[in-house]
Image (cartoon, coloured by chain):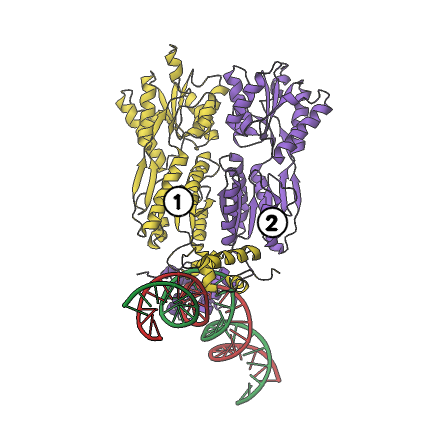
Chain colours: A yellow, B purple, C red, D green
Amino acid sequence: MGKGRVTVIDIAKAAGVSKSTVSLVLQASPLVNESTRTKVNAVMRELGYVYNRGAANLRQANARSKIIGIVVNDLTNSFFAELAVGVDTVVQSAGFVQFLSNTSESIDRQREVIASMREHGVSGLIISPARGTEATDLKPLVVAGIPVVLVVRNIPGAKVSSLVSDNHAGTFAAVEHLAALGHSRIAFVGGFPDTAVFDERLSGYRDAMSKTGTGFQDELVVSSAPSRAGGVGALARAMAMPEPPTAAVCFNDAVAFGVCDGLRARRIEPGKDFAVVGFDDVIEAKTTVPALTTISVDPQGIGQRAAQMLLKQINAGKPEAESVVSSVRLIVRESCGAAMNKLGRKMA
Amino acid sequence: MGKGRVTVIDIAKAAGVSKSTVSLVLQASPLVNESTRTKVNAVMRELGYVYNRGAANLRQANARSKIIGIVVNDLTNSFFAELAVGVDTVVQSAGFVQFLSNTSESIDRQREVIASMREHGVSGLIISPARGTEATDLKPLVVAGIPVVLVVRNIPGAKVSSLVSDNHAGTFAAVEHLAALGHSRIAFVGGFPDTAVFDERLSGYRDAMSKTGTGFQDELVVSSAPSRAGGVGALARAMAMPEPPTAAVCFNDAVAFGVCDGLRARRIEPGKDFAVVGFDDVIEAKTTVPALTTISVDPQGIGQRAAQMLLKQINAGKPEAESVVSSVRLIVRESCGAAMNKLGRKMA
DNA sequence: TGACAAAGTTGGAACGTTCCAATTATTAAC
DNA sequence: GTTAATAATTGGAACGTTCCAACTTTGTCA
């Protein structure tokens, strides 16, 4: 047994029909007689047949394989893991299989990964681009007519669909909320300054600071790596200021957790002596102590919507690029001190 | 332009050579003249040629595609995300590309995903099986001669390689450490009772409890979902006992974080009034406050070793199954109170 | 009975690549 | 100047599938 692989012809011989008929069975064609179908299926099970999608794809030059590629820039960030899960759910139920790769923010790695995916004939790509990705990097994909949906980070000039969250509105709402609670020295903490997401979130912060009358001050923005460790470091610099802030709007939840860690290490209780607001609403945000006030972007939901956008393009044939910004909302929990205020204890 | 895709024949025509020569160039064969090679390469770039691996695979019946599949049971758990990153690093540098899918603990989904991967001709599979996976589920893979490495959870009777961490030794060490710090009411918290991993960790706990003379008591093991939320719930039940524990060995870090959350919600300070030990050593463990004492299993390292085992099998041709249990070590940080003890403050 | 349609089935060509054996061009050796 | 060896190139067959047009069988209707 098992010298070469079992092919459609082996099945045909064993079932006493032609390979064409077997092929029709594989495609669940209504043309084939019910009794033939069951017999062929039985033989396939018996011989342990595995469909060779490569060969099939070769023949149907038009229809691409049933693979959706998803490329993320940092899988260890649970935001992306959840996004991937969201994509997976809709993609699987549409009969596709997901092909996830991680670039770790490396442009070279990203190029390799995308090339590999093209070689394997992906039907479409969902990409959260690595830092520094440019429109020209995506050019080959659009000329090849491969549908692409960018998520999280948009790339100006790339003629592909994108789905980003409303970063400006998010930080704007965060600042407004903190100002309403009585804070005026509100820092913007964390994130790498050379990314579009950073710019958008910072501008929301800046606009709100100006509007609420407290004014925007450059020294109150302290950047760092967008990670927990980065948050710890950034907080240290913020607290070293002559007049330290009493509240922080953080680049993302990871940074916010780091800020809380740093505060506690200084015997300052987040949510009581200092207000912290995150961005993303990862799962841990609601179970941690104190529960994190944050901007909800629903990573799974984003993944699902991105997948839907992509499938729509794939089915439409002609990839019509659309840009959607997904709205966002402030989830008030404990880390901003709002709960305390209700009890009459004024903070800051 | 660009009706059909660019093939090796188009390149051959444009470069004035035969398709065979182009094929040799693609495989970097030393047979082809240097000047021919550069010319062909130039034409390929110019026409935007993409290699069709499907077609290639079809011809080389022996050599499988350069895909490694990785199947995890819960991508939202950062342990698995990190494991995947570890696999990715070694797999990519060997010229393979990774194909990750998430089963969300569903056996059906797992079957679909594995079938899809076979259809796409994966060279090998790294699987962290869903709960309830049986040896027969893996049977088709081994008869087809596809190398498989099981990680995290082993499956008795499956004739495939496995790489699991030394769960028994881990919890044993944790209990010994806590006993040395003076604890005697030590609970085992979290995890689903019907998994092999749970049994192993529990038996390490049980053996150590017996050995240290405090004895094993059934009521001190309180199970739950292996998540942060599960930890919160389990702690609540533990503290409701007539004689509540003073320390907890947790099923994994996620549960341990939940336990810390629950303690703080009760105004009990983890690492001071109550000792907590986790299992896994995820990245957050060292930056959180208090830093988590835990059993280090180095998820990225496991991923890398698993990938190496798999590549070895793929290159060897004949898949020789090997079982390795990866050793594990106790990382003492703050949440167990050991640091406090050094300062003379006795806990519990 | 013959004509026609409907339901099933079928062989061969095609997809884009690699492998093989065969061919041609070039160089080396006598 | 012929032969042998080497270097470089080549056409055709094969991989496992799907599509197409053609075919057979069975049933229906005038």
**Residue sitting at x 52%, y 24%:** B258
Cα gap from disc 1 to disc 2, whole angstroms: 34 Å
Measured as percent of width and height from the top left, residue B264 is found at 51, 18
Q: Residues within 10 Å of mark 2 (few under 14, many from 20)?
A: some
Q: Of the numbered discs in the image, which one, if any, rests on residue B139?
A: 2
Q: Is residue B151 left or right of residue A92?
A: right
Q: Residues within 10 Å of mark 1 (few under 14, many from 20)?
A: many
Measured as percent of width and height from the top left, residue B40 is found at 42, 65
Q: Which is nearer the eye, A269 or A325?
A: A325
Secondary structure type for disc 2:
helix
The amino acid sitting under disc 1 is Ile
Residue designated by label 1: A126
Q: Quadrant of the N terminus of chain A?
A: bottom right
- Against A299, is B346 above or below? above
Q: Is residue A234 left or right of residue B299?
A: left
Q: Is residue B245 left or right of residue A136?
A: right
Measured as percent of width and height from the top left, residue B98 is found at 50, 48
> What's the chain of the residue with tag 2?
B
The amino acid sitting under disc 2 is Lys
Mark 1–mark 2 CB contact (< 8 Å): no
